[in-house]
Image (cartoon, rainbow, N blue to C red):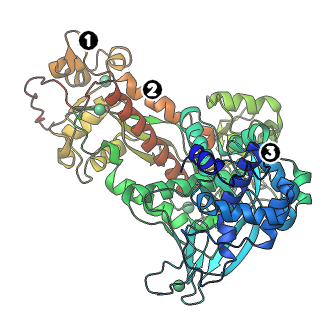
């Protein structure tokens, strides 16, 4: 029923207006009681079993609250309730106004009533194996805070319902049985996502953060700062006086947990499945297995948006210098225990070896070098450099980091702070007077680069982390693997800056026969400027002009610079991902790419330009290479 009909249908008989309530009081009456429906239902006897039916009796606390809030006596509240309860029961609870919020604060909080109460979606046990028919009455409530987009931080209650029959506990977002958490959401992500024992985040806010990460490279730390500075509108003293004493500051961990949980829930929503997580253990570990499973799926199946993409004639591969901390041991891919470690658990013993490359003497206690005087001097120099203010700026410049991931200098909030170590070069060269240059590993190592495969339309088809320097053979393995997933369609042309080396390797070795029918060219710009005109193999094999299929007159048919733009976009995450351990690193980048692909596809389709089918370009040239 609309607001109009409610007011007009009643105003002719014994209406609220006739009871002496103003129009505004009438709205307040309807709105606050509509918000308290769950609380009203919960205290009814379990014989009152119909959630769709309004009970006749209001609980004493709600009666007293409504009476105080409207300044009318309880008897009048009761008779108004009896007159309007059916309409109110069907009334969609709207966002409370500032005025209503104030009434809850002044008259509700002390009675355990808030404008927002988070309940499970139903008062009944929905375990099919249970069979209990009557509503659940065993409830526990807990004070929580809810971070919202429009109304800032709100004090609220979380209500858990317990089924004594099958021992299931129903939380607002999920049910728990035998230590297993099953999220309710199948076709919709819950409106408020729980990220801590006392913290919920409104879904709209999480999508705002994810969008900020996607289009503006905003880090988790900066998301939390933006919220605290601009949106939280929080009055700490007020909260504490009301009993909410666990603080309202949003942390970086809350942001990342919200990102992860939302991404996992959205993943299951797309598949019509339910997210299942362990209920025990730490919040930070709870989602690890689910993240790993998703990462593995991307490896096995690629990015779903690009599956079946018909615009497959050309794909561009490129490396970009972003990475995550890794073990110092060459070729080791075992994950680190902590992003501050230099070695993985297996190679942890090497922490006692001198950091100078080629020296394996035992370190002095508390230092990273042995007692060799040169090595001591190198470490002293390293320490002095690290303390110099200009170094930080230099190194950030060198990493082309236009957007540090924390706007507050020197603050170490959460797990994302720029430690001096974090921006150190992985390899440090030192030349002592009159000596040859020597290399040392004082800081943590990072993986070498991300390799991407990008279609000229801007869709990212695949990515992989390279632990060592980008070797041509690794790139070939990566490309072949990326196109060996189910449904992948083999490209006709591969554009890669080092294709002259790659094509030579392919020509020389039967192992690379997968590439025999693929054209391998270098980008026009690179061909003209970077490839030696005297290099015969290159001139004969890598010149894009030799393939009319790729040319439109004397112009490049495919815009390979779009691929370059994609890599610039992806490279923008350098400062955000540099401290992440591999599971989170892959999960985060995979989701950013998935969302970016989604937007690219949308844009291409909205533009009425069907990129998936290109005009016929004549028969493909044959690339059956002669082995050399
Ligand atoms: Zn049950
Ligand atoms: Zn290792
Ligand atoms: Zn040494
Ligand atoms: Zn395309
Ligand atoms: Zn060349």
Kindly identify which residue carries mark 2: 565
- Which of 121/197 is in front? 121
Does 42 appear above or below 96?
Answer: below
Q: Residue, x 90% and y 53% (percent of image)?
A: 238
Kindly identify which residue carries mark 3: 99
Query: Which quadrant would residue 525 be assigned to in this image?
Result: top left
As drawn, the label of residue 143 is: none
Q: Position of residue 545 (x, y in %)?
A: 21, 16
The Cα atoms of the two marked residues, 3 and 1, are separated by 65 Å
Q: Is mark 2 on a helix, strand or loop?
A: helix
Does 544 appear above or below 462?
Answer: above
Name of the residue lying farthest toward the front: 13
Name of the residue lying farthest toward the top: 554
Horizontal side of 170 relative to 108 (left or right) equals left
The Cα atoms of the two marked residues, 2 and 1, are separated by 19 Å
Q: Which quadrant, please, contains the C terminus?
A: top left
Q: Residue, x 30% and y 14% (percent of image)?
A: 533
Query: Which quadrant would residue 623 be assigned to in this image?
Result: top left
Kindly identify which residue carries mark 1: 555
Query: Any atom of ligand 4 within 8 Å of the CB at mark 1?
Result: no
Mark before the other along the chain sequence, 2 or 1: 1
Q: Where is residue 452 in the image (x, y as percent from the top left)?
A: 40, 39
| Mark whose residue sits in front, 3 or 1 | 3
């Amino acid at each position: 029923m609309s607001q109009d009909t409610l007011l007009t249908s009643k105003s002719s008989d014994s209406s609220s207006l006739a009871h002496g309530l103003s129009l505004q009081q009438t709205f307040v009456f309807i709105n606050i009681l509509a918000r308290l429906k769950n609380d009203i239902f919960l205290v009814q006897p379990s014989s009152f079993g119909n959630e769709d039916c309004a009970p006749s009796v209001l609980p004493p606390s709600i009666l007293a609250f409504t009476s105080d809030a409207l300044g009318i006596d309880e008897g009048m509240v009761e008779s108004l309730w009896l007159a309007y309860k059916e309409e109110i029961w069907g009334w969609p609870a709207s966002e409370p106004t500032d005025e209503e919020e104030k009434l809850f604060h002044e008259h509700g909080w002390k009675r355990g009533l808030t404008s927002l109460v988070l309940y499970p979606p139903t008062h009944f046990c929905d375990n099919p194996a249970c069979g209990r028919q009557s509503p659940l009455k065993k409830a526990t409530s807990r004070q929580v805070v809810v971070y919202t987009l429009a109304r800032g931080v709100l004090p609220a209650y979380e209500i858990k319902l317990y089924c004594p029959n099958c021992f299931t506990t129903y939380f607002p977002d999920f049910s728990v049985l035998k230590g297993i958490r099953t999220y309710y959401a199948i076709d919709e992500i819950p409106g408020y996502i729980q990220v801590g024992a006392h913290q919920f985040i409104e879904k709209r806010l999480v999508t705002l953060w994810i969008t900020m990460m996607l289009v503006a490279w905003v880090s988790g730390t900066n998301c939390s700062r933006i919220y605290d500075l601009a949106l939280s509108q929080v009055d700490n003293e007020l909260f504490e006086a009301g009993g909410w004493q666990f603080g309202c500051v949003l942390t970086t961990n809350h942001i990342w947990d919200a990102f992860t949980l939302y991404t996992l829930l959205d993943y299951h929503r797309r598949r019509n499945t339910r997210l299942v997580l362990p209920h025990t253990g730490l919040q930070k570990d709870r989602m690890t297995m689910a993240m790993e499973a998703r990462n593995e799926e991307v490896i096995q199946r690629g990015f779903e948006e690009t599956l079946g993409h018909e615009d497959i004639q050309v794909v561009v591969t490129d490396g970009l210098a972003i990475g995550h901390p890794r073990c110092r041991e060459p070729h080791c891919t075992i994950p680190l225990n902590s992003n501050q470690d230099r070695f993985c658990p297996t190679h942890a013993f090497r922490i006692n070896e001198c950091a100078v490359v080629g020296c394996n003497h035992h370190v002095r206690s508390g230092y990273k070098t042995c007692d060799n005087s040169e090595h001591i001097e190198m470490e002293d120099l390293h320490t002095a450099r690290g303390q110099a203010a200009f170094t930080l700026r230099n190194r950030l410049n060198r990493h082309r980091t236009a957007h540090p991931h924390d706007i507050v200098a020197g603050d170490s909030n959460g797990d994302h702070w720029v430690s001096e170590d974090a921006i150190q070069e992985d390899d440090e060269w030192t030349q002592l007077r009159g000596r040859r240059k020597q290399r040392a590993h004082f800081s943590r190592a990072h993986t070498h680069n991300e390799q991407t495969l990008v279609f000229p339309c801007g869709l990212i088809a695949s990515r992989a982390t390279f632990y060592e320097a980008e070797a041509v053979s690794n790139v070939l393995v990566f490309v072949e693997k990326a196109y060996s997933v189910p449904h992948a369609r083999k490209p006709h042309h591969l554009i890669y800056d080092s294709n002259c080396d790659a094509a030579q390797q392919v020509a020389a070795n039967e192992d690379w026969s997968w590439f025999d029918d693929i054209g391998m060219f270098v980008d026009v710009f690179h061909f003209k400027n970077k490839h030696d005109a005297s290099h015969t193999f290159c001139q004969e094999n890598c010149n894009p002009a030799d393939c009319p299929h790729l040319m439109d007159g004397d112009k490049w048919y495919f815009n390979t610079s779009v691929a370059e733009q994609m890599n610039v976009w992806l490279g923008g995450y350098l400062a955000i991902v540099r401290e992440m351990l591999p599971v989170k690193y892959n999960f985060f980048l995979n989701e950013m790419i998935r969302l970016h692909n989604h937007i690219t596809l949308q844009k291409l389709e909205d533009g009425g330009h069907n990129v998936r089918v290109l005009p016929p370009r004549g028969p493909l040239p044959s690339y059956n290479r002669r082995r050399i």
